[in-house]
Image (spheres, coloured by chain):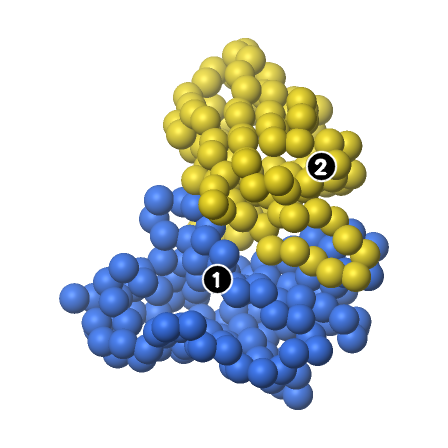
Chain colours: A blue, B yellow
Amino acid sequence: AQKVTQAQTEISVVEKEDVTLDCVYETRDTTYYLFWYKQPPSGELVFLIRRNSFDEQNEISGRYSWNFQKSTSSFNFTITASQVVDSAVYFCALSEPYSGSARQLTFGSGTQLTVLP
Amino acid sequence: DTEVTQTPKHLVMGMTNKKSLKCEQHMGHRAMYWYKQKAKKPPELMFVYSYEKLSINESVPSRFSPECPNSSLLNLHLHALQPEDSALYLCASSQGQAIQTTYEQYFGPGTRLTVT
C-alpha cells in the first residue's frame, strides 16, 4: 500500500531564511507520481509541482526547488529566502497510475510552515 | 486559466435542511472530484466523476449525493447531515483519468460547512 510521511508537523522560520520540507513515500510500483500542494489560510490547495518516477532531475522554479531521490524514497521541497506569504500548510502526495485505487492521491499529513517577519 | 470556482463560500445548515454545494471549471477538464477536509488534516476523497460518470464513491454516506450535470459543473447535494459533517468541502478538476498517468488536480477555494 502507498504511504506518504511528512514528519515535520510544524516549522517556524524567520523571513529570508531557507527552509526544507521533507517528504518520504512508500510504494511497490515502479511507475508513480509525486506532487506538492500549498494550502494558505484561505483554504484553497494550490498545485506546485508534479513529478513522475522516471524523472529524477531536480527542479527549480524561482525560490522553490525540489530534490527527488529514489534511493531514499524522498521528494523534498526547499524554499529559498522565505517570505511571510509562504506561510501555509504544504502537502506532499503520491499517486500510482496502475494501482486499484484508480490513480488517486495519497496525501501526507502536511507541514505547517510559519514565516515570521 | 487554472480556476475552479465554488459556491457558497460558507454554509450553515441544520440537521434537517437540504442544501447544495456547487463547483464549476472552464479548463476543459474531464475529471472532477469532491474532497472533505477536517481541520489540521489532509483532504479525503469522496467522489470522482470521469467524463460525467461517477467513477469512484469512497463509501460516502447517502446523505451526500453528487451530481454532474455537464462537464463543467459538479454539485454536492446535502440532506440530513450530522454535526460531524462540518468541514471544508473542496472541489477539484484534472485533465482526465488515464491509465498511464496521473494529472495534477486544480482545487477550488472550498465551502466551509457548519452543521448545527
Q: Residue at x 47, y 31 (%)?
A: B6
Q: Label 1, label 2: how many angstroms apart (C-alpha)?
A: 23 Å
Name the quadrant of the C terminus of chain B.
top left
- Numbered label attached to residue B49: 2
Q: Is residue B20 above or below residue A29?
A: above
- Amino acid carrying label 2: it is Tyr
Whole-percent x and y of residue B61?
69, 29
Residue A48, numbered circle: 1
Residue A106 sits in quarter: bottom right
Q: State whether discs 1 and 2 lie on one chain.
A: no
Between A66 and B85, which is closer to the camera in this rendering? A66
Taking the spot 42% from the left edge, 21% from the top edge, the residue there is B12
Q: What's the amino acid at mark 1?
A: Leu
Q: Which mark is residue B71?
A: none
Q: Secondary structure at mark 2?
A: strand
Chain containing mark 2: B
Question: In the image, residue B70 lies at what x, y percent?
Answer: 67, 26
Other-residue count near label 2 (Cα within 10 Å), few / some / many at <14 / 14–19 / ≥20: many
Determine the residue positioned at 60% across, 28% down.
B73
At x 55%, y 36%, the residue is: B26
